[in-house]
Amino acid sequence: MGIDVRPARPDELDAVVEVLRGAGLGASVGRLLRFPLDCPSGEVLAALLGDEIVGGAAVAGFGATGWIGALGVAARARRRGAGLALTEGCIELLRTGGAETVLLYATAAGLPVYRRAGFAVEGEAHAWRDLSPPRGRPQADGVRPLLERDMAVVRALDRAATGEDRGAVFSAMVRPPGLIVERAGRVAGSAVRSPWGLGPSVVATDREAGIALLSVLRRVPGAPLTVSLPDANADAVRALRAWGFAPINQATRMRLGPAPAYEPARVFGMFNLFWG
């Protein structure tokens, strides 16, 4: 009996989420899937073995680029081609939607599957957690709350850092909570949280702006800051280590197709390891 991959029906989404949780994608994977479900360029796929859902994945398209995320397979169905079938189904969906480049973050278990599908390694990333957050008011020179009028600049900063037009993400957020850092009257960085992501997206034009935003974020009341960022941003990694952050997981950025104009040194935090 072969693996069948198709878009998940609304009444199958709970089963997909349950499989993904069992595959180790975490308790919050259901919240993460809300974006592809709500986005016109997104989709959630189900892998079926007979009538049983044994895997799932999601895609988010951003025009010339697209992402595969939250891909997982139940233990009982592994080594039967479900992972590769899901990957190929995601690629087909994204390419049909116009994506020239497909991106993803792979776990160690997923790397061989994605290599077989033709993906190349671009670099490593880690998620970091603040083990000893400081006390005191969250403030720094030039850092202020994000306002609605800032969104055009935030999108431009994001394009410059990622090489992608992720307008679909920002358009789906209503007055997102966040911060801006200004230098000499110009916006030099932004930090934005989404309702689906696990951490803040932090992008900046330079080291000082990015570090200033992270410094303020770790003082915001609430749970200790968790932030994901590329290892290639050595300045940010050094700052996190100096503050007492510890790495909690690792993933490999992979690409199928032309490389976008990605600038990892400008990325001080990612929304998540689904769409970066």
Image (tube, rainbow, N blue to C red):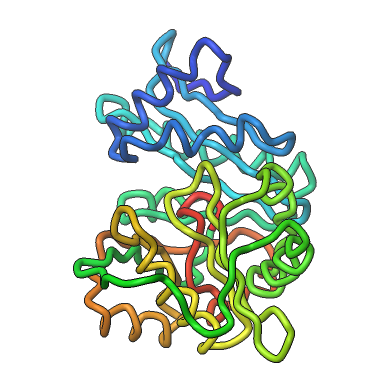
Q: Which residue corresponds to the image point at 58% horizontal and 15% vertical from the top-left?
A: 9
Number of numbered discs present? 0
- Where residue 107 appears, as percent x and y from the top left, is 35, 54
Residue 79 placement, left or right of 274: left
Outermost residue on the front side: it is 137
Position above or below: 253 against 63 = below
In the rendered image, the quadrant that contains the N terminus is top left
Residue 155: x, y in percent? Answer: 73, 63
- Quadrant of residue 250 within the rendered picture: bottom left
Q: Is residue 101 left or right of residue 237?
A: right
Most foreground residue, 58 or 132: 132
Residue 15 percent location from the top left of the image? 40, 17
Q: Is residue 165 above or below residue 123?
A: above
Horizontal and vertical percent position of residue 66: 66, 50
Say which of 98 and 175 sits in front. Answer: 175
Q: Is 130 left or right of 220, judged from the image as shown? A: left
Q: Quadrant of the C terminus?
A: bottom right
Does 210 sit above or below residue 82?
below
Query: Within the image, what quadrant is residue 165 found in?
Result: bottom right
Question: Residue visible at 49% across and 59% down?
Answer: 200
In this rendering, would 12 be left or right of 250?
Answer: right
Residue at figure coordinates x 74%, y 86% from the top left: 185
Q: Could you say which is closer to the camera, residue 86 or residue 200? A: 200
Residue 11 versus residue 136 in the image, above or below: above
In this rendered view, identify the residue nearer to me: 80 or 178.
178
Residue found 79% across the figure and 47% down from its top: 98
